[in-house]
Image (cartoon, helix red, strand yellow):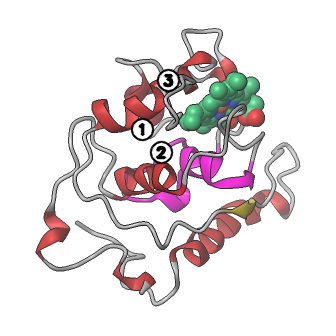
């Protein structure tokens, strides 16, 4: 798998910050139609162990369905349901993957929700990782933020190619996408 950021000596948060800043630079330098701001208040997830094998339905959709870890129930899907849904984004089971992967944001079409292999370019990750994302508020809008483990799960799923089924375990054999954090 081709990974341009993987051999960088920079910690992941720095790569995210640089990538997002450069992605947004154009809008700050004159594309006045865009409402995007440089994200800030982003949580470090570098101490969370990597999850190599992530099954979308069980893990990612499971988080969308209920992200509480205290036995209660609160889902992204409580707001992000069938249209007209919050933020124009339906995250319910069966449609969430195709609404996210390679799909431009309803709030700023220059940003995609999920860019496979590139969590640092993916608005979905930024929205759950940063207090002030490029557009709108940090998610979930209530009962947040997500735990660092949940944030890292989204990161690792995207870094693993954001498949509709299960991320493979290729990196177990040696090359570690998050090894540069250590
Ligand atoms: C209480 C309602 C609510 C909950 C719960 C919620 N959201 Fe949102 N979400 C919104 C609203 C309202 C917006 C639009 C305003 C904004 O972006 O701040 C939005 C926007 C978004 C966007 C950006 C849409 C766009 O095109 O810019 C994403 C991505 C997102 N939410 C993901 C999530 C995820 C993932 C969760 C669960 C971890 C979640 N949301 C939980 C209400 C909610």
Helix, strand or loop at mark 2: loop
Q: Are marks 3 and 2 in contact (CB under 8 Å)?
A: no
The structure residue drawn at horizontal position 38% and vertical position 18%, both measured from the top left corner, is 93
Give the label on residue 114, or none: 2
Q: Which one is earlier in the sequence, the residue at label 2 or at label 1?
A: 1
Of the two numbered discs 3 and 2 in the rendering, the one whose residue sits closer to the viewer: 3
Badge 1 density bin: few <14, some 14–19, many ≥20, Cα 10 Å: many
Q: Which residue is mark 1?
A: 101
- Quadrant of ligand 1: it is top right
The residues tagged by marks 3 and 2 sit, at their Cα atoms, a distance apart of 13 Å
Of the two numbered discs 1 and 3 in the rendering, the one whose residue sits closer to the viewer: 3
Indicate whether 94 appears above or below 141: above
Across and down, in percent, residue 45 comes to 52, 66
The structure residue drawn at horizontal position 38% and vertical position 37%, both measured from the top left corner, is 60
Is residue 105 visible in the rendered image? The answer is no
Quadrant position of the C terminus in the picture:
bottom left
Magenta-drawn segment: 110-134
Q: Which residue is mark 3?
A: 91
The residues tagged by marks 2 and 1 sit, at their Cα atoms, a distance apart of 5 Å
Is residue 109 visible in the rendered image? The answer is yes
Give the label on residue 58, or none: none
Helix, strand or loop at mark 1: loop
Q: Are marks 2 and 1 in contact (CB under 8 Å)?
A: yes
Observer-nearest of 84 and 67: 67
Q: Which one is earlier in the sequence, the residue at label 3 or at label 2?
A: 3
As for residue 113 lying within the magenta part, the answer is yes
Across and down, in percent, residue 17 comes to 65, 70
* Left or right of 147 on screen, residue 55: left
Observer-nearest of 44 and 21: 44
Residue occupying the far bottom of the picture: 9
């Amino acid at each position: 798998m081709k990974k341009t950021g993987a051999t960088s000596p920079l910690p992941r948060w720095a790569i995210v910050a640089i990538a997002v800043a450069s992605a947004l630079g154009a809008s700050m330098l004159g594309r006045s139609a865009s409402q995007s701001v440089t994200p800030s208040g982003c949580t470090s997830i570098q101490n969370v162990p990597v999850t190599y094998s992530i099954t979308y339905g069980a893990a990612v959709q499971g988080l969308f369905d209920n992200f509480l870890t205290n036995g209660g129930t609160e889902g992204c899907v409580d707001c992000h349901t069938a249209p007209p849904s919050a933020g124009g984004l339906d995250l319910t089971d069966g449609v969430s993957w195709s609404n996210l992967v390679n799909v431009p944001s309803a709030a700023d079409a220059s940003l995609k929700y999920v860019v496979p292999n590139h969590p640092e370019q993916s608005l979905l990750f930024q929205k759950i990782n940063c207090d002030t994302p490029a557009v709108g508020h940090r998610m979930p809008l209530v009962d947040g933020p997500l735990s660092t483990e949940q944030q890292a799960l989204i990161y690792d799923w995207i870094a693993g190619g954001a498949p509709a089924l299960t991320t493979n375990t290729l990196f177990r054999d040696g090359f570690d996408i998050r090894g540069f954090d250590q």
